[in-house]
Image (tube, rainbow, N blue to C red):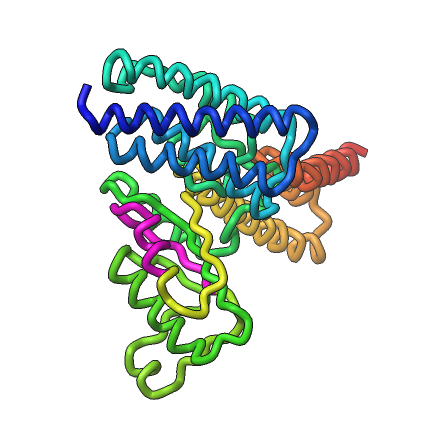
Amino acid sequence: MNAMIEGYIEDLKDNLTSFGNALMVVKLGSIDADVIDTIFNVAHTIKDNSAAMEFEQVEKVMHIMEDILHEIRNGTMKFSNNILDILFACHDFLKVCLDKIEKDNSDTSIDISSILDLCSVINIKNIESNKFLHPSQIIIPDDINSMLYINIDPKTWHIMSDNLEKGFSPYSLEVDFADGCIMKSVHAWLIFQKIEAFSMLIHSNPVRPDDKSFKDGYFNMEGTTMQFLLLTEKDINELVADLEKLGNISSIRSYYIHPKEINILLENHKMREKIQKSIIDISIQLVDLETTSNNNLINDIADLLDNISNLNFTRSKNYIKLASKQIAEILREKVHL
């Protein structure tokens, strides 16, 4: 066994001890910021050490643990019994990893499917480690309108989708300026420059100004947050680390956008187009109905309403389906009577 693996194993043992002690504190009912920070630091250290040793199985699992704990620290995810179960399972998983790596000097034979399945009960829609999960494990909210960037032009999502097969990974990125930031427009311009040097910028809010507008002083950064959609072949953490070196930045959030989310957004736009077309067709029929009371026209309107009710709505939009169906039934009853 070489010195690097020996050092990795010794460090893993120390982190397992810290992890176990923190879990015992949590089990006794004491969950505070210090305990969460301890577990987060353990996950972060093991993830980085595993990446350096090319232990990809361990790295994937610890990346997910780190991201979940990051959300808890930020207050965007609540600590729950499910998360506690995942943390204990992760501790057991790491003990198995320790035995395997001591025996084989490798983690390639370690099965991570069980712990990934356990993680799938957590809504990790906005967590960067989504890319390690199978699409069937991604939990998408019933209300699609709560998804990020729902109202962006579908052409943007088509660009994102078309580039996935070329090896690009899609991310959303949000950068917050610190309070009292001076020369905000200059800092915003620097952020644009860094992002474009690192990745393919697909969408931004605010819109990226052209070079002449910036140099002539026409670009004025309003608000305190910049939002980006980008495609990259590199590790997004490299970009985040580079942006963090800029002054007057209070926080940066990066999220991996799972292909399943992109497909759902594209399907949602298609559904909107179908609904809009049906509504236009209904309007045309209603104009004719104003001058001619015709049972065939009424049946045509009922058919168009049926087209809407047969679309695959999310649960939160089922009222559209029910309303369209009921109105169609009323119209047909009128014709029958």
The spot of residue 7 in percent (x, y) is 27, 28
Q: Residue at x 57, y 48 (%)?
A: 74
The spot of residue 312 in percent (x, y) is 56, 34
Give the image quarter of residue 296.
Answer: top right
One can see residue 237 in this view: yes
Foreground of the two, 265 or 175: 175
| Above or below, 8 relative to 243 | above
Give the image quarter of residue 60.
Answer: top left
The spot of residue 169 in percent (x, y) is 32, 44
Direction from residue 62 to residue 315 in the image, left or right: right
Task: Tell whether position 151 is magenta.
Answer: no
One can see residue 307 in this view: no
| Above or below, 279 relative to 312 | below
Q: Residue at x 31, y 23 (%)?
A: 9
Give the position of the C terminus as an image quadrant.
top right
**Count of all numbered marks drawn on residues in the image:** 0
Q: Residue furthest right?
A: 337
Foreground of the two, 229 or 74: 74
Q: Which residues are magenta?
A: 226-243
Q: Residue furthest left?
A: 2
Q: Residue furthest bottom?
A: 216
Direction from residue 331 to residue 168 in the image, left or right: left
Q: Residue at x 63, y 35 (%)?
A: 79
Task: Tell whether position 240 is magenta.
Answer: yes
| Above or below, 122 relative to 92 | below
The spot of residue 54 in percent (x, y) is 24, 30
